[in-house]
Amino acid sequence: MPIVTRVERYQGQCGACGTDSIAPVPEHLAPGSPFGQSIESLATYLRYGHAISYERLHQLLNEVFNLSISEGAIANLLTRVKDRLVEPLAEILSHLRQAEIICSDETSA
């Protein structure tokens, strides 16, 4: 079961000078996405390993893990994962392009 932390930030206005001020995010919480690596890994695996649609992935995460994540948030999550994989993918492709054998059939067919 995921651990969900909700932070509510409030904004106020100074009565003297009229300057708006918003409460900061607590220091121990990382900026950016509220979803950690385990959710990113699971969503990426289900989306690309099992070709689950965004709509179904939204339903699945909600029904199985009680994690309400919108289809848009899933798309943003997958984009962040993709961006982090650009460099490792380039390295893998470089090794493959230098290999003498690229494909091997283990079925003996």
Image (cartoon, grey):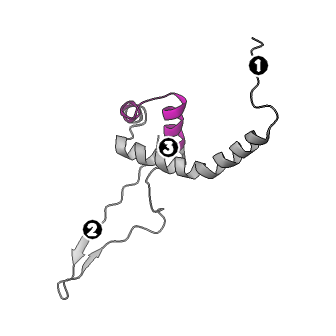
User: Which numbered disc flags the more N-terminal residue, 2 or 1?
Assistant: 2
Give the magenta range. 40-60
Label 2 environment density (alpha carbons within 10 Å; few <14, some 14–19, many ≥20): few
Identify the residue under disc 3.
Answer: 39
* 34 in the magenta segment: no
Give the image location of residue 44, x and y in percent: 51, 39
Choose between 27 and 97: the one closer to the eye.
97
Identify the residue under disc 2.
Answer: 10
User: Which numbered disc flags the more N-terminal residue, 3 or 1?
Assistant: 3
Of all residues, the one furthest to the right in this rendering is 100
Which of discs 3 and 1 lies nearer the camera? The answer is 1
Q: Which residue is located at x 74 percent, y 39 percent?
A: 96
Spatial CA distance of label 3 from label 1 is 33 Å
Query: Which image quadrant: the C terminus?
Result: top right
Tag 1: residue type?
A: Glu
Q: Which residue is located at x 32 percent, y 71 percent?
A: 23
Identify the residue under disc 1.
Answer: 106
Which of discs 2 and 1 lies nearer the camera? The answer is 1
Spatial CA distance of label 2 from label 1 is 60 Å
Q: Which residue is located at x 38 percent, y 30 percent?
A: 56
Q: Which residue is located at x 46 percent, y 69 percent?
A: 27
Give the image location of residue 13, x and y in percent: 21, 78
State whether the magenta stretch is mostly helix, strand or loop.
Answer: helix
Question: In the drawing, does residue 81 fall left or right of residue 7?
Answer: right
Give the image location of residue 75, x and y in percent: 41, 44
Mark 2, secondary structure of its residue = loop
